[in-house]
Image: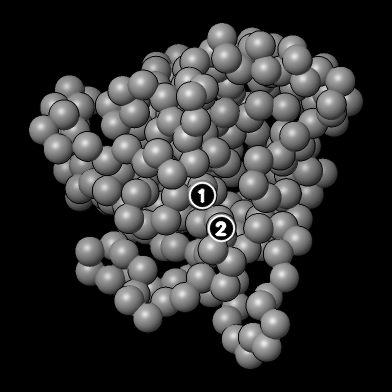
Amino acid sequence: MFRDVSACNTYNYGDALYWDARYIQDANSGSFDWYQRYSALRPFVRKYISLTSRVLMVGCGNAVISEDMVKDGFEDIMNIDISSVAIDMMRKKMIFVSLTHVDMQMDVKDMSFFPDESFDSVIDKGTLDSLMCGTSAPINAAQMLGEVSRLLKPGGVYMLITYGDPTVRMPHINRPVYNWKVELYVIPRPGNQKPAGSTSLKSYLEPVPMTEKGLLPADYTLEDPDSHFIYVCKKADDPTAVSHGSSNSLTDDTLRR
């Protein structure tokens, strides 16, 4: 079963009670952005997501990425998080940024509040990773990704920012039922310095070619061993091309692995 435990610990990151307690404990610590700040992600966001897109930010926490995107000109962002404490923090903060902004408590495994094809884009910075560290990880991941696929309009983009390399993420996101075309980018951690003597001319803004099995090429070397990975998953423009299957069939397939 495709469960990535490389960055997991004993905490259940898929549990609302854990996150409520954590946000209460860290209430005086200010906003916290997982992995990357918007300044580093901006080239990718602006390339694949238009300013007028309706954007769903899953697992928003109390991060500032939504705030930064609004300041950058994005007009329609919906924040959701399983933690009511995080959503309350976001509402209090964002009221000074955008009056049209909406924040809602919601479990990413069940977003039935929204109709099919409600969003042009979905951004996920660490939320799938959290589910992968919880109990019943493969099933939870399948439920979430099934919902993301359902909510995306044809031609829409799911942008996943994660610590998970293709060996542990592609088995989840590269399923025929989603019919996503996936592009991969690799970026170093904030503040990472190239190794001494490095002469690499590699651009982080260029997609990394993957093998037919969806893996990194055998000769590909990570300049930063703890790099972050950006998967840009574009939904097929032609809805008839999408493989049809129920959430139950997807879950059953996951259980058989």
The image's mark for residue 226 is 2
Label 1: state its secondary structure. loop
At 51% from the left edge and 56% from the top edge, which residue is drawn?
229
| Circle 1 crowding by C-alpha within 10 Å: few under 14, some 14–19, many from 20 | many
Question: Are the residues flagged by discs 1 and 2 in contact, CB closer than 8 Å?
Answer: yes
Q: Nearer the viewer, mark 1 or mark 2?
A: 2
Visible in this render: residue 4?
yes
Q: Nearer the viewer, residue 257 or 182?
A: 257
Which residue ends up furthest to the left in the rendered image? Answer: 256
Rendered location of residue 205, percent (x, y): 59, 71
**Horizontal side, residue 206 vs residue 97: left or right:** left
Q: Quadrant of the N terminus?
A: top left
Measure how far apart labels 1 and 2 are at the Cα level.
Answer: 7 Å
The image's mark for residue 163 is 1
Rendered location of residue 25, percent (x, y): 75, 15
Visible in this render: residue 106?
no
At 51% from the left edge and 49% from the top edge, which residue is drawn?
163
Label 2: state its secondary structure. loop
Ranked by sequence position, the earlier of labels 1 and 2 is: 1
Q: Quadrant of residue 92?
A: top right
Q: Nearer the viewer, residue 139 or 101?
A: 139
Disc 1 residue type? Tyr
Q: Quadrant of the C terminus?
A: top left
| Circle 2 crowding by C-alpha within 10 Å: few under 14, some 14–19, many from 20 | some
For the image shown, how many numbered marks are present on the structure? 2
**Horizontal side, residue 237 vs residue 113: left or right:** left
Disc 2 residue type? Asp
Q: Quadrant of residue 55?
A: top right
At 56% from the left edge and 60% from the top edge, which residue is drawn?
227
